[in-house]
């Protein structure tokens, strides 16, 4: 069975990252867990350091999610990469297994989650195109590592989606019925959170126009396998 490297990018996730790490500890399908601490100024690094089984890589300053993902990818030792957000709630070892098995059993080339609090439109479509929980082979990413490192942080999933479409990879959608992605308003307060959500939306549209995103999502849906 193929070995999996799990990569988590974290920035100021002290209250949340411990729960994610608990779901990964001694997981039989994971060969290594890499956490890239992207210049956190809270106690995130201290939480990570309490877990000796984790490979911790620290950025001295915040470089953004895309740069942190590049660091994780370049330091991973396996071809299969599992990406998880550091701010998930109620994720379990069973959720990790559910994400991994379609790829490990060669039923798909990529696995992407739909979460409990994914937007309603994504639940209707059955596909959360911007989910950070996904498994993909490093061989599809490594040739694009320079471009990935230069991306705005909010565009990384869209960029990976482009790679999936260009390579016509089979996509499995895994519904994680209990997993919640922490909203920015909960992290930094209502108004600052709203501003960050707007910034994210504007970055996405600037990076790949609204029409471009819609076309990409349509192509991804056609690559979905049951």
Image (cartoon, rainbow, N blue to C red):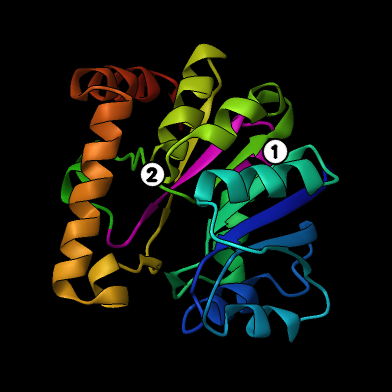
Residue at 51%, 13% (x, y): give it.
166
Q: Image check: 110 left or right of 104?
A: left
Q: For the residue labelled by badge 1, is the local secondary structure a helix, a strand or a loop? A: loop
Q: Nearer the viewer, residue 213 or 74?
A: 74
Give the number of the mark in front: 2 or 1.
2
Return the mark for residue 33.
none
Q: Residue 114, position in %: x, y?
A: 37, 50
**Disc 2 target residue:** 154
Task: Identify the mark nearer the N-term, 2 or 1.
Answer: 1
Q: Image check: 155 left or right of 85?
A: left
Q: Is residue 109 above or below residue 64?
A: above
Residue at the farthest front position: 61
Q: Is residue 37 above or below residue 188?
A: above
Q: Nearer the viewer, residue 122 or 184?
A: 184
Q: Image check: 150 left or right of 107?
A: left
**Crowd band around label 1 with a 10 angstrom C-alpha radius: few (<14), some (14–19), many (20+):** few
Q: Nearer the viewer, residue 83 or 95?
A: 83
Which quadrant, please, contains the N terminus?
A: top right
Q: Nearer the viewer, residue 225 or 57?
A: 57
**What stretch of residues is rendered in magenta?**
102-117
Q: Quadrant of residue 149?
A: top right
Q: Is residue 138 above or below residue 54?
A: above
Q: For the residue labelled by badge 2, is the local secondary structure a helix, a strand or a loop? A: helix
Q: Residue 194, position in %: x, y?
A: 16, 61
Label 2, label 1: how far apart the Cα atoms are: 31 Å
Q: How many marks?
A: 2
108 within the magenta span: yes
Q: Residue 138, position in %: x, y?
A: 72, 33
**Disc 1 target residue:** 105
Residue at 63%, 79% (x, y): give it.
22
Residue at 46%, 21% (x, y): give it.
162
């Amino acid at each position: 069975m193929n070995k999996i490297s799990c990569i988590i990018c974290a920035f100021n996730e002290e209250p949340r990252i411990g729960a994610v790490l608990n779901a990964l500890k001694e997981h039989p399908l994971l060969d290594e867990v890499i956490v890239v601490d992207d210049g956190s100024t809270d106690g995130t690094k201290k939480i990570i350091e309490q877990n000796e089984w984790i490979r911790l890589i620290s950025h001295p300053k915040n470089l953004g999610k895309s740069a942190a993902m590049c660091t994780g990818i370049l330091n991973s030792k396996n071809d299969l990469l599992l990406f998880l957000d550091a701010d998930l709630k109620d994720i379990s070892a069973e959720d990790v297994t559910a994400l991994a098995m379609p790829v490990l059993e060669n039923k798909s080339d990529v696995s992407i989650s739909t979460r409990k609090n994914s937007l309603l439109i994504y639940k209707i479509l059955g596909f959360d195109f911007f989910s950070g929980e996904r498994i993909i082979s490093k061989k599809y990413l490594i040739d694009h590592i320079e471009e990935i490192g230069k991306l705005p942080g909010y565009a990384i999933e869209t960029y990976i989606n482009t790679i999936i479409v260009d390579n016509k990879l089979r996509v499995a959608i895994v519904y994680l019925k209990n997993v919640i992605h922490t909203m920015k308003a909960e992290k930094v307060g209502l108004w600052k959170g709203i501003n960050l959500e707007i910034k994210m939306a504007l970055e996405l549209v600037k990076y790949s126009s609204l029409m471009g995103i819609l076309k990409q999502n349509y192509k991804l849906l056609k690559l979905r396998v049951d």
